């Protein structure tokens, strides 16, 4: 969130920001607070509607993108949107936490700034809180970097040495962890499609997060989350262990997120163990 705050410091006071109508809830809360304080005008758009996002750009200062989004897994057309932002003189920021730099390179697609929650896949072991803000190796990128660096220095968002070391250590196996987690996610997504208690599978085939909407509404989803033994019902994602969460149990989760949605962060365990535990928990969704 310190990285997210640093990126929002690029928005001039009273400026206009275009944001997704549902994305990581800390970002949603940040823009809602800016709006309530009269510090920003907020235009909320459906990220999957490229024309609508482009139409919201004239006169804006900053375009905030996240793709795939947390937890709806909506995918934005990053090359088109970042090019349109540039054309309108709007700074583009992409939260690339879900895809990681191995699956998606927003700077190469034309983004000005990329943000990562290093807490998730990059560190990968659910034992560190850290963020990163990245700019391009261009003159414009270096100028942004100088502003972000100063913000970090003055606001105190400085990583501790232990956190930096844990993140470096985790990143050494990012390619291996991600390969396994993505293979597990693809297999589980395919099997979930035909489970009778699953009404919808959201899986863009980009990363290792799968969101499902289960039968029985909010209670059905709570029953499933309570019945798993290997999958832990917990916040966070991107670690070696599989977690799931009914996101709407969080009070400030956007209303666009269905009550019966479970976000699955697929880890690196044996896929048959994951399936056995999840499918038997789903068998109880309608109890
Ligand atoms: C978790 C998350 C964040 C915030 O990261 P923290 O490390 O928890 O501060 C930002 N964006 C996305 C997409 C996330 O999933």
Image (cartoon, rainbow, N blue to C red):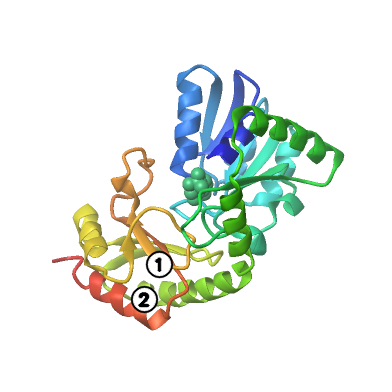
Q: In this view, does 224 lie above or below 6?
A: below
Q: Where does residue 218 sit, x and y in percent of width and height?
A: 23, 53
Instruction: Assign a secondary structure to mark 2.
Output: helix
Q: Does the rendering let one see residue 90?
A: no
Count the labels in the image.
2
Q: Where does residue 116 sit, x and y in percent of width and height?
A: 60, 49
The quadrant holding residue 234 is bottom left
Residue at horizontal 54 percent and vertical 67 percent from the top: 205
| Residue lying furthest right | 139
Residue at horizontal 58 percent and vertical 46 percent from the top: 131
Q: In this view, does 107 lie above or below 92?
A: below
Q: Where does residue 101 sit, x and y in percent of width and height?
A: 66, 59
Q: Does the rendering let one see residue 135?
A: yes
Q: Mark 2 points at which residue?
A: 274
User: What is the quadrant of the C terminus in the image?
Assistant: bottom left
Residue at horizontal 38 percent and vertical 63 percent from the top: 243
Q: Mark 1 points at which residue?
A: 242
Residues at discs 2 and 1 in contact (Cβ within 8 Å): yes
Residue at horizontal 58 percent and vertical 63 percent from the top: 170
Q: Which of 76 and 187 is in front in this view?
A: 187
Q: Decide if residue 117 is on the left or right side of residue 197.
A: right
The quadrant holding residue 61 is top right
2 or 1: tag closer to the N-terminus:
1
Instruction: Assign a secondary structure to mark 1.
Output: loop
Q: Nearer the viewer, residue 88 or 34?
A: 34
């Amino acid at each position: 969130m310190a990285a997210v705050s640093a990126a929002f410091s690029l928005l001039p006071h009273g400026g206009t920001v275009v944001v997704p109508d549902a994305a990581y809830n800390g970002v949603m809360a940040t823009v809602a607070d800016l709006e309530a304080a009269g510090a920003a005008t907020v235009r909320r758009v459906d990220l999957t509607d490229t024309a609508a996002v482009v139409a919201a750009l004239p006169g804006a200062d900053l375009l905030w993108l996240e793709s795939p989004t947390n937890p709806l897994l909506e995918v934005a057309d990053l090359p088109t949107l970042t090019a349109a932002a540039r054309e309108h003189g709007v700074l583009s920021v992409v939260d690339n936490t879900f895809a990681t730099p191995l699956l998606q390179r927003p700077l190469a697609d034309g983004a000005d700034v990329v943000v990562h929650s290093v807490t998730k896949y990059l560190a990968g072991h659910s034992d560190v809180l850290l963020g990163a803000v990245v700019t391009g190796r261009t003159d414009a990128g270096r100028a942004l970097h100088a502003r972000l660096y100063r913000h970090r220095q003055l606001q105190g968002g400085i990583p501790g040495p232990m956190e930096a070391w844990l993140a470096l250590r985790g990143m050494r196996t990012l390619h291996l962890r991600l390969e396994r987690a993505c293979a597990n996610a693809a297999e589980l997504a395919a099997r979930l499609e035909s489970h009778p208690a699953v009404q919808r599978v959201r899986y863009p085939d980009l990363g290792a997060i799968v969101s499902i909407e289960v039968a029985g509404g909010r209670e059905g989803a709570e029953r499933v989350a309570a019945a798993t033994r290997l999958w832990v019902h917990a916040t966070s994602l991107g670690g070696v262990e599989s977690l799931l969460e009914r996101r709407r149990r969080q009070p400030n989760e956007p209303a666009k997120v269905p009550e019966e949605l479970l976000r699955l962060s697929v880890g690196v365990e044996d896929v048959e163990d994951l399936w056995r535990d999840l499918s038997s928990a789903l068998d109880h969704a309608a109890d």
